[in-house]
Image (cartoon, grey):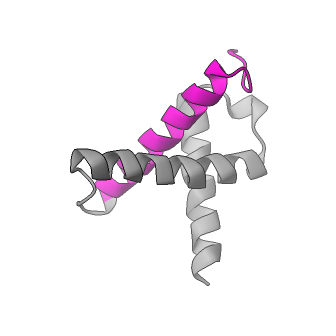
Amino acid sequence: MGWIVSLIIGGIVGWLASIIMKTNAQMGIIANVLVGIVGSWLGFWIAGMLGFAEGGLIIRLIIAIAGAVLLIFILRALGIFKRT
């Protein structure tokens, strides 16, 4: 049951990040889930190194979205996503 929740939350985080970065039209549900999960991991890894990993639900959601936005930025720099 935990992996289903991770997929759902990853999809929501990836979708919100794709809206922020204006890549929503280029990404499908699978890309949203992958970007959400990997971006969340990236965000929590960076936040842990900076000492910001502790916090409530809202802080953790912001960290996850920020990590997904960073991942989309990196993927855009590599040419995987194009600017619209």
- Compared to residue 51, the image places residue 73 above or below, namely above
The N terminus lies in which quarter of the figure? bottom right
Please give the name of the residue rendered at 60% of the width and 46% of the height, measured from the top-left corner: 14
The C terminus lies in which quarter of the figure? top right
Q: Is residue 17 left or right of residue 27?
A: left
| Total numbered labels placed on residues in the image | 0
Q: Is residue 36 left or right of residue 66?
A: right
Percent position (x, y) of residue 70?
Answer: 49, 33
Q: Per the image, is 61 magenta? A: yes
Q: Per the image, is 59 magenta? A: yes
Please give the name of the residue rendered at 52% of the width and 42% of the height, measured from the top-left corner: 68
Look at the magenta stretch and give its main secondary structure.
helix
> Looking at the image, which residue sits at the far bottom?
1
> Looking at the image, which residue sits at the far top?
84
15 or 51: nearer the eye? Answer: 51
> Looking at the image, which residue sits at the far front?
49
Percent position (x, y) of residue 65?
Answer: 46, 44
Quarter residue 4 falls in: bottom right
Please give the name of the residue rendered at 47% of the width and 47% of the height, measured from the top-left corner: 42
21 or 43: nearer the eye? Answer: 43
Percent position (x, y) of residue 82?
Answer: 72, 18
Please give the name of the residue rendered at 28% of the width and 56% of the height, measured from the top-left corner: 53
Percent position (x, y) of residue 36?
Answer: 58, 50
The magenta region covers 58-84
- Compared to residue 2, the image places residue 6 above or below, namely above
